[in-house]
Amino acid sequence: MRHEGGQMTIATSSNGGVRVRANDQGTPLHIAIERTELRREPQDLADAVVRLCREAATTAGLRRRAEL
């Protein structure tokens, strides 16, 4: 997948309740949160989103370097 000249990818939590699509810089382009995840503590949910942004950025960065 390409977006604005950069690579992007999707990272998903282990239970599939949180999904983040981010570019290779870690900028979230789309965040999907299942209703059941809204029962979590706000800080835990925020930490999960940030962790998934980093994971997606790492994967997208690796893919981008592989293309070079």
Image (cartoon, rainbow, N blue to C red):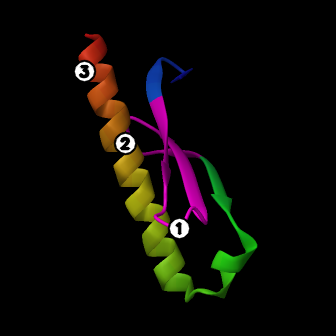
| Residue receiving disc 2 | 57
Q: Earlier in the sequence, mark 3 or mark 2?
A: 2
Callout 1 touching callout 3 (CB < 8 Å): no
Note whether 17 is above or below 53 in the view shown: below
Looking at the image, is mark 2 or mark 1 nearer the viewer? 1
Most foreground residue, 36 or 48:
36
Note whether 21 is above or below 45 in the view shown: above
Magenta-drawn segment: 8-29
- Residue at the (53%, 23%) spot, across then down: 1
**Element class at badge 2:** helix
Quarter of image, res 6:
top left
| Residue receiving disc 1 | 15
The crowding category of the residue bearing disc 2, from other C-alpha atoms within 10 Å (few below 14, some 14 to 19, many at least 20), is many
Quarter of image, res 37:
bottom right
| Residue receiving disc 3 | 65
Question: Disc 2 residue type?
Answer: Ala
